[in-house]
Image (cartoon, grey):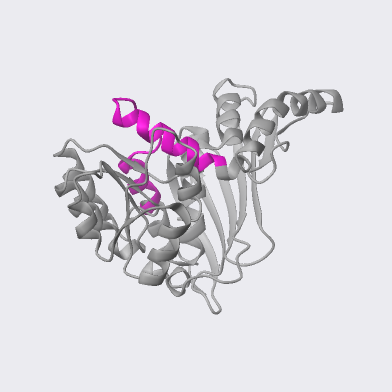
Amino acid sequence: MQLHLPALARLAEVEVAALADADAGRLNAAGTEWGVDRRYADYRALLRDPSVNAVLITVPTPFHCEVFLAAVDAGKHIYIEKPLAMNLEAADRMLAAAAQSAVRTVVGFNLRSHRLVQKARELIRAGVLGPIVSVRTVLVGGQQERPAWQCRRAEGGGALYELGIHHFDLWRFLLDTEVAHVEAQSLSNDSDDANVAVTARLRNGALACSVFALHGAAAHEVEVIGESASLRFSLYRADSLEIRPAGRLRQFTRWLQQLPGAAQAARRGGDYADSYRIHWLRFLESMRGGEPPATLQDGREAVRIVLATIESPHATL
């Protein structure tokens, strides 16, 4: 919620009408900070509130299916954080319920709405890199303290569910392809899947390689290698998009081209924080008939990849 509420505050067409949390202290702190007077200890009471048109579901992953189905029954539009569900059976129940209703839904893959991810996808689809050879990503959480559930795989925690699922979706989104095969090496200490290295073969013939770590110096890097050129960027640095091979002049020119967008994002807290605002804006547009930026099927596919990774021969050591 620490990223969603600031993003929603920057959308003039949105009012945060109510909050629900079983933790009274956390509920009252958030309500006071963001000026939300209607506060519920039970999410079902919030779903009965007629002033609420859409809900954000950020409960721990094992409760996603239960809360989602209740929101569908209540006729509320739904923004649900990743992972969509703990398993494919729950995901399929959610997809079936939504398909039989008029509610609009979106999965919280906010990286799809990050300015640099959008630019990278545009360049890849335009053929600037040529046929894609591989994609390499790194995501280190940077947080030393996490809720206990975020450290337990059985509760939707660990680096695969908490971090990796974002990049599994990025593989698909950036390259417009699916995952054919995946394997992993996972190390656990005080947390399940504290550090994970994943390799995959994609259906377009490219290879993917990603490293995820719950703790350590924060990093969020993407590199896509094509036969003609490659690009790389950091989701935490506004001026980081580079294309290779290219002379320094081309790289410098591309950096200059990024300045206007980077400056605008900086005024909203940076590209990463602003990706939440943009993702919400695109969700609002889908409620008016547009396409959602990330569908429930996208959420299901990311869960499928996580489960395949866990079941791979070297997933646990």
Q: Position of residue 36 (x, y in %)?
A: 38, 53
Q: Position of residue 22 (x, y in %)?
A: 31, 69
> Measuring 50% from the left and 56% from the top, which residue is drawn there?
2
175 vs 208: above or below:
above
How many marks do you count on the picture? 0
Q: Position of residue 147 (x, y in %)?
A: 47, 71
| Foreground of the two, 309 or 56 | 56
Instruction: Indicate yes or no whether the magenta region holds residue 287.
Output: yes
- Left or right: residue 273 compared with residue 253: left
Please tell me in which quadrant of the rendered image residue 70 appears.
Answer: bottom left
Q: Position of residue 23 (x, y in %)?
A: 36, 71
| Foreground of the two, 67 or 174 | 67
- Left or right: residue 270 compared with residue 240: left
> Measuring 25% from the left and 41% from the top, which residue is drawn there?
53
> Measuring 46% from the left and 65% from the top, which residue is drawn there?
313
Q: Quadrant of the N terminus?
A: bottom left
> Which segment is the magenta one?
274-303
Instruction: Indicate yes or no whether the magenta region holds residue 40.
Output: no
Q: Main secondary structure of the magenta part?
A: helix
